[in-house]
Every structure is written in structure tokens, then in C-alpha cells.
Image (tube, rainbow, N blue to C red):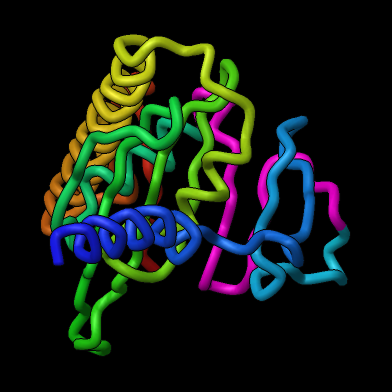
Amino acid sequence: MRVKLALFLIILLIAIPHISAVDTSDWIELTVNNVDFKIPDKYFNESKGKNHIKSYRYSNQFAIISCVDYNTLKEEYGYDSTSEGLVDITQTSVSGHDLIHIYDNYKSRWDSTGFNTSYVFFSTGTKIFKITFKGDKITNEIKEIIKNTPKSKMSEETFITKLDNAQRDYLTEEYNKNLELDLEDYYRTYNDEHDRGHFYYWGTNGFGVGGTHRY
């Protein structure tokens, strides 16, 4: 009986990798910002071609975005990591690639179903990329996409620092932008109440003049 049980366990352990393995035989190869990817055929839009400079998108279901440019990283990570619909942020790794997984399920007053969207920022070579997909978990399919990219040459500390700095700069810019808009609204209201043709304000770009002529 014990021999049969041991034999069964051995067969089960051998079979598990084959059961969980992802079949990539029909996946499409494409290049985004000089990094080669393999993606499931269901996400490939042939009309866009196989080579893309900065990003690849398949409707609102799937996207690969190059965040090599700091402004892109700042806008993408800064916004996603501070979104109103943010549910969870998790740091992990896949096959030597450090990554941050963000799950967003924002529900608007027009659509109560929620976004149900994940954003994964990961390191590959010396670059950072973002993959967007529907769902709250990193599936084996998404892991396989990341696994097939070049091994990361970026340390975990460098990866996290880049993301932290991007978020910090994004929040700073948003704060300054909102502050300036608030000041403009205040002085516009003030000048309207006093029936003036112009309003004056001090913003991040210095002293400014706005026009509100009345006829």
C-alpha cells in the first residue's frame, strides 16, 4: 500500500509542471523599444504590425508600455499607484524580474462594475516596462510574458527607488498644478465680484494675468 502511495505521489509531482505549464507555441513575437516580447495570439492585432517603438496595445484588454523615459514612468506609475480606485499594491518577482503589481477597481457613478484592471511594472535588462491586463491576479500567462523578456540587470533597490522617485515627482507636480488652479479660481471669483477686466495670480510659473472682459 505504501509503495503504491509513494508511486502515486511521484507521478503526481512529475505531472504538476506539465499541467501548469503555459503553451506558447502559437504566441506572437513583437518588439517594444528594442525589447523582444512573446504574447498570446488573442492579444495580437496584425494591422498594427509586429514592431512598436514605445508601446503595444490591444483595445482595453492588454497593453505593453515602455517606461524607459522618466516622464513616462512618472505619469504611468505616479497615476496608477495613487489612483482613486486603488485596491492593492504588491511587490514580488517573477523569474529574476522584480515587479510591482497594482490592482485598480475604480467604480464611477456611471459604471458600478469597476475597472478590474491590473498594472504590472517590472524590470528587464536595464529598463522598466508596464503590462496592463484585466483581472486582479498575475496569471501564469502574464508571468510567462515577463519570464520571456531579458533577465533584469537592475538591482531591486534601484528598481524600487526609480518607482518611488517617479511617484514622488508625480504627486509634487499634481499638488502644484492643483494649487495653481485653486489660486486662479479664487482670484477669478474675486475679480468677478469686483467687476474687473483682468485677474492677477501667482502660480508655479510666476506672476500671471488672466482676462475676463465683460461686455
Image quadrant in which the C terminus is located: bottom left
Image quarter of residue 193: bottom left
- The answer to whether 39 appears left or right of 100 in the picture is right
Q: Is residue 186 above or below residue 107?
A: above
- Between 198 and 32, which is closer to the camera in this rendering? 32
Q: Residue at x 40, y 37 (%)?
A: 94
Q: Per the image, is 183 magenta? A: no
Quick check: 77 above or below 134? above
Q: Percent from the top left, x then y, of residue 76?
A: 43, 42
What residue sits 54% from the left and 39% below the top? 147
Q: Nearer the viewer, residue 125 or 61?
A: 125
61 horizontally vs 78: left or right: right
Q: Describe residue 95's horizontal placement relative to residue 45 as left or right.
A: left
Image coords of residue 29 (percent x, y): 79, 51
Please name whichever residue, 161 or 184, is drawn nearer the observer in this view of the structure.
Answer: 161
Q: How many marks?
A: 0
**The N terminus - image quarter:** bottom left
**Residue under the point 30% across and 20% down:** 160
Give the percent coordinates (x, y) of residue 93.
34, 33
Residue 81 visible, this angle: yes
Taking 47 as reference, is 95 above or below it?
above
As drawn, is 21 to the left or to the right of 32? left
Residue 40 position in % (x across, y down): 65, 65
Confirm whether residue 195 shows in the render. no
Q: Quadrant of residue 168?
A: top left
Vertical order, 197 against 104 (above or below): above
Identify the image quadrant of residue 161: top left
Highlighted magenta segment, given as a residue range: 50-71
Residue occupying the point 62% across, 35% down? 149
